[in-house]
Amino acid sequence: MARRAATKPMTRIQRQKTEQILTAALEVFAIHGSSGASINIIAKTAGLTTPNILYYFESKDAIRQELLSRTLQLWMAPLSLVNPNGEPIEEICTYIKRKLEISQNFPKDSKFFANEILSGLPHSRDELFGPLKDLYTSKILLLEDWMADGKIAKVDPHHLLFSIWATTQHYADFDAQIEELAPAAPADRFAEAEAFLMQMYRKLLAV
């Protein structure tokens, strides 16, 4: 939480400064990870002084926690929108499309989240995985219900979600690799990825 937010409502200027800091911090964490990031680097990237950063956030970890909270909400939103009353294959394909949109529109957020997972989350496992586990479990049960009702093919629901995460987040987390190897321009690349994934998962889940 921002230091100023904990004391009294922020002014418009303070909100702008907070967002300026968080935008810079996201870039720094996405590139350097938690261990390589520092208040000084964040300040330089934001075009602010270190004391200015510490006026709004008491530590690097406070910035990290705020970013993690925001990124988790972004990451969980598409999964929460999977509708139990919708047509199952269409709901899953829409989820995949939304995950690809996040990779396309929020690549730094995706890289930051991936770096946090890779770090082992020494200080945030419960904070991160608590709400995620609840949502994840509810969607696993939904997938199992759809399979039991014969609405989608019977596959391992855990690996189904893991594979969706892997095939969508890859386009953000490994964009440098893809840019070197894939011939398509970025916009076309995501359109091609969506077409490929739709075909693959529709065939996998068809009954």
Image (tube, grey):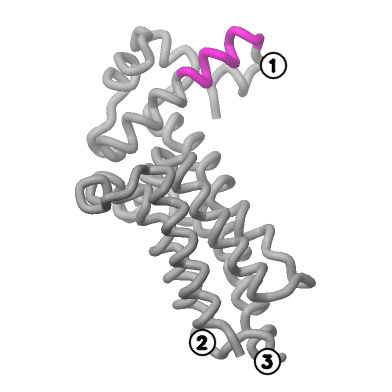
Q: Which residue is mark 2?
A: 155
Residue 106 % position (x, y): 47, 40
Residue 135 % position (x, y): 62, 64
Residue 46 part of the magenta-drawn span:
no
Q: Which residue is painted at 56% across and 65% down in the image?
A: 133
Secondary element type, mark 2:
loop
Residue placed most toward the observer, 190 or 13: 190
Question: How dense is the environment of label 3, judged by Cα within 10 Å: few (below 14), some, or many (20 and up)?
Answer: few
Q: Which residue is painted at 51% across and 34% down in the image?
A: 66
Q: Which residue is painted at 51% across and 75% down in the image?
A: 201
Please report whichever mark, 1 or 2, sits nearer to the chain's N-terminal start: 1
Question: Chief secondary structure of the magenta span?
Answer: helix
Q: The magenta stretch spans which residues?
A: 11-20
Q: Nearer the viewer, mark 3 or mark 1?
A: 3
Q: Are marks 3 and 2 in contact (CB under 8 Å)?
A: no
Measure the alpha-carbon separation of dots 3 and 1: 52 Å
In the picture, the disc for residue 150 is 3
Please report whichever mark, 3 or 1, sits nearer to the chain's N-terminal start: 1
Q: Which residue is mark 1?
A: 9
For badge 3, the amino acid type reads: Gly
Measure the alpha-carbon separation of dots 3 and 2: 12 Å
In the picture, the disc for residue 196 is none
Q: Which residue is painted at 58% across and 88% down in the image?
A: 153
For badge 2, the amino acid type reads: Val
Q: Are marks 3 and 1 in contact (CB under 8 Å)?
A: no
Residue 88 % position (x, y): 68, 75
Vertical placement of 122 versus 29: above or below?
A: below
Residue 70 % position (x, y): 54, 39
Q: Quadrant of the N terminus?
A: top right
Tell whether 71 sits left or right of 49.
right
